[in-house]
Amino acid sequence: MNTCVSVLLTVYASVPVILYLFPWILGHVIYAHLLRLPFFVDLSRPEDVLNNTWNFYLNTEEDISVGVWHTLPVGQYEENDGREPGWHQETLGDGHPVVIYLHGNVGTRAIHHRVQLVKILSAAGYHVFSLDYRGFGDSSGEPSESGLTTDALFLYHWVKRHSRACLVCLWGHSLGSGVATNSAVKLQEQGFPVEALILEAPYTRIGEVVESHALAKFYTFLPGFQGLLWNILEQNNIVFANDENLKTLTSPLMILHSEDDGVVPHHMGLKLYQISLQTRRRLNTSAEVKMISFSARHGYSHNNVYLEPGLPTMVGSFLQNLMQ
Ligand SMILES: *[C@@H]1O[C@H](CO)[C@@H](O)[C@H](O)[C@H]1NC(C)=O
Ligand SMILES: *[C@@H]1O[C@H](CO)[C@@H](O)[C@H](O)[C@H]1NC(C)=O
């Protein structure tokens, strides 16, 4: 019994020590990119999990290659089947809106809930691009906040170049919501504000998610632990400050958040909604901002908003308004 207690105490006490000695571990926990779930999908063969899809790679920096899936609006792929390489990018600019899907942490672009959402968006008539940021899936390199943002911006510019006047929407889920707003801030600063932004299960800033995590709560009464966490995040340049970003962003915004989200609490989405309303008031702009909360009784939790039968209509009316 005594040994058992002392082992538990040692394990308990060693977590902060290990984090202190090896601060990069926290980065690995946050990105969880080495967990390449699902294990038995060949990312170069999207047809095994997803129809209408073309796999390709972009060099977002000299030595970084990232894997991307381009899923066409349903029906368009078969029509074009068997054509030369590059035909799929010619289909951009056909008037169908484009969604760039920025996924959350853990795993690859082939994870089930990601694939299901892409299917729904494709069926609703959108082009969808889903990428694995550097370090994720079959992409090279190591993740970092600025690196993920660079990858997303590179894909955005690539899509814009090929899609000409079509509406392009950034959709960020969970960790990806920070990538989406970071990118949108950069684009707005450069004078090319994003035409539409959808944030699914977004957080205020990543440190607040770490703090609210059940495991971290174990340690909240350990003096200095929270300070240690914030220090490590700062050292690793991991901020993902949606709250700060939305103080300047004026792009049309739709937030989707389930009330029973067990990873990023619903009140964080609500806080972002309020920040965005204030920004619009302060800057006197009428750009749309919308929050859709899903009742806990649906049980969508953190990943499964795609189960909402009304989702295509919600996305459709948001984007349709912007195209007029
Ligand atoms: C692709 O579409 C066909 C025909 O609708 C269907 O039978 C098949 O299951 C789909 N494949 C995937 C991977 O969803
Ligand atoms: C806000 O913008 C509207 C038009 O977009 C304008 O009529 C109004 O005067 C502006 N208000 C302020 C305080 O600038």
Image (cartoon, rainbow, N blue to C red):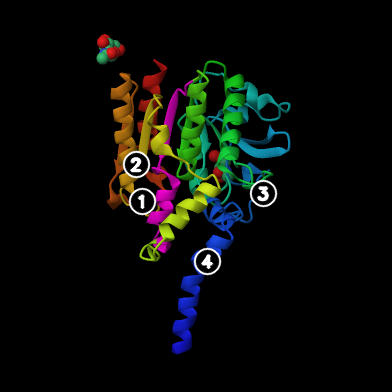
User: Which residue in the structure is indicated by mark 4?
Assistant: 17
User: Which residue in the structure is indicated by mark 1?
Assistant: 261
Badge 4: residue crowd in 10 Å (few <14, some 14–19, many ≥20) = few
Q: What element carries label 4?
A: helix
Q: What residue type is labelled 3?
A: Asp
Q: Which amino acid does label 4 sit on?
A: Val
Q: Which amino acid does label 1 sit on?
A: Asp
Badge 2: residue crowd in 10 Å (few <14, some 14–19, many ≥20) = many
User: Which residue in the structure is indicated by mark 2?
Assistant: 269
158 sits left or right of 1 in the view: right
160 sits left or right of 8 in the view: right
Disc 4 or 2, which lies upstream in sequence?
4
From the viewer's perspective, is the residue at label 2 or at label 1 nearer?
2
Front-lying residue, 251 or 236:
236
Percent of width and height locating residue 304? 41, 48
Percent of width and height locating residue 113? 48, 47
Q: Are marks 4 and 1 in contact (CB under 8 Å)?
A: no
Q: At x 68% / y 36%, what residue is drawn? A: 57
Q: Look at the image and give the residue range highlighted in magenta.
A: 193-216
CB of mark 3 near ligand 1 (< 8 Å): no
Q: At x 61% / y 37%, what residue is drawn? A: 69
Q: Which amino acid does label 2 sit on?
A: Gly
Badge 3: residue crowd in 10 Å (few <14, some 14–19, many ≥20) = some
Q: Do the residues labelled 2 and 1 touch (CB within 8 Å)?
A: yes
Residue 121 on the magenta segment: no
Disc 3 or 1, which lies upstream in sequence?
3
Q: At x 50% / y 74%, what residue is drawn? A: 11
96 sits left or right of 317 in the view: right
From the viewer's perspective, is the residue at label 4 or at label 2 nearer?
4
Q: What is the spatial separation of the Cα atoms under label 3 and label 4, in whole angstroms?
A: 39 Å
